[in-house]
């Protein structure tokens, strides 16, 4: 099954596009424009991805549109791959050293799926000794690209552990939400919450 996933540069670009705009139906010509590849290569990969059950297509007014299928068996894993290599998550991982001593960082799946956030929702949580201006620069860059505000929270490890031990409602809500861990180990992250 792995041969379904990473066989070409075009496939990687298509996965990044679809999984960073998960609810959007996209026309073939728009896909070609966004990934910057030849139309025949894009059509060939879309055909393969549809055959493997990764994408679905539909016709609207003589135009074919594609969408990634959330029920695809490796959807969550691919979403994690893309979250760690592109967009906000990719920038957090790539700039990890500049951000300080990051112990944990994760993005909510809701954020990755472009689902509207409530006022209490947190898109990104970072735990560690954070260099705030660096983090703010990464966040501001992504907010400009998305043209929307990103709800994020950061704290040092002592505060995080204290809030976990106290079973702080904010921390518990953030930790139990579906998420993709960018930095750190999810088992360590949830230690003390499940106990």
Image: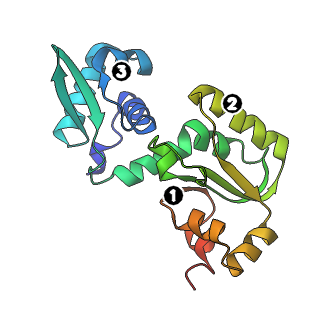
Q: Label 1: few (<14), some or many (≥20) within 10 Å?
A: many
In the rendered structure, find residue 179 and report the number of the disc placed on it: 1
Q: What element carries label 1?
A: strand
Looking at the picture, does residue 128 appear above or below residue 32?
A: below
Q: In this view, does 100 lie to the left or right of 150?
A: right
Q: Label 3: few (<14), some or many (≥20) within 10 Å?
A: many
* Residue drawn at 57 percent across, 36 percent down: 87
Q: Nearer the viewer, mark 2 or mark 3?
A: 2
Q: Label 2: few (<14), some or many (≥20) within 10 Å?
A: some
In the rendered structure, find residue 109 and report the number of the disc placed on it: none
Q: In this view, does 84 lie to the left or right of 5?
A: right
Q: Are marks 2 and 1 in contact (CB under 8 Å)?
A: no
Mark before the other along the chain sequence, 3 or 1: 3
Separation (CA) of disc 3 from disc 1 = 27 Å
At which x and y percent is residue 17? Answer: 42, 31
Q: In which quarter of the image is residue 8?
A: top left
At which x and y percent is residue 143? Answer: 64, 32
Q: Nearer the viewer, residue 87 or 7?
A: 87
Q: In this view, does 41 lie to the left or right of 90?
A: left
- Quadrant that contains the C terminus: bottom right
* Residue drawn at 79 percent across, 44 percent down: 98
Instruction: Give the residue number, with chain letter if any, for mark 2.
Output: 141
Looking at the picture, does residue 98 appear above or below residue 166?
A: above
At which x and y percent is residue 25? Answer: 31, 29
Q: What element carries label 2?
A: helix
* Residue drawn at 80 percent across, 63 percent down: 156
Instruction: Give the residue number, with chain letter if any, for mark 3.
Output: 31
Mark before the other along the chain sequence, 2 or 3: 3
Separation (CA) of disc 2 from disc 3 = 23 Å
Mark before the other along the chain sequence, 2 or 1: 2
């Amino acid at each position: 099954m792995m041969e379904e996933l990473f066989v070409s540069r075009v496939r990687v670009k298509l996965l990044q596009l679809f999984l960073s705009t998960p609810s959007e139906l996209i026309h073939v010509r728009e896909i070609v424009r966004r990934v910057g590849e030849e139309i025949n290569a894009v059509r060939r990969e879309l055909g393969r991805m549809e055959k493997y059950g990764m994408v679905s297509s539909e016709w609207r007014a003589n135009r074919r549109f594609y969408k990634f299928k959330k029920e695809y068996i490796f959807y969550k894993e691919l979403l994690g791959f893309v979250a760690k290599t592109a967009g906000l998550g990719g920038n957090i991982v790539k700039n990890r050293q500049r951000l300080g001593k990051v112990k944990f960082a994760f993005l909510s799946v809701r954020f990755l799926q472009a689902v509207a956030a409530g006022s209490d929702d947190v898109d990104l949580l970072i735990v560690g000794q954070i260099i705030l201006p660096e983090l703010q620069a990464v966040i501001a860059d992504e907010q400009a690209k998305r043209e929307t505000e990103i709800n994020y929270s950061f704290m040092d490890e002592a505060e995080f552990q204290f809030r976990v031990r106290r079973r702080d409602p904010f921390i518990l809500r953030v930790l139990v939400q579906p998420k993709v861990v960018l930095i750190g180990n999810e088992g360590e992250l949830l230690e003390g919450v499940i106990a």
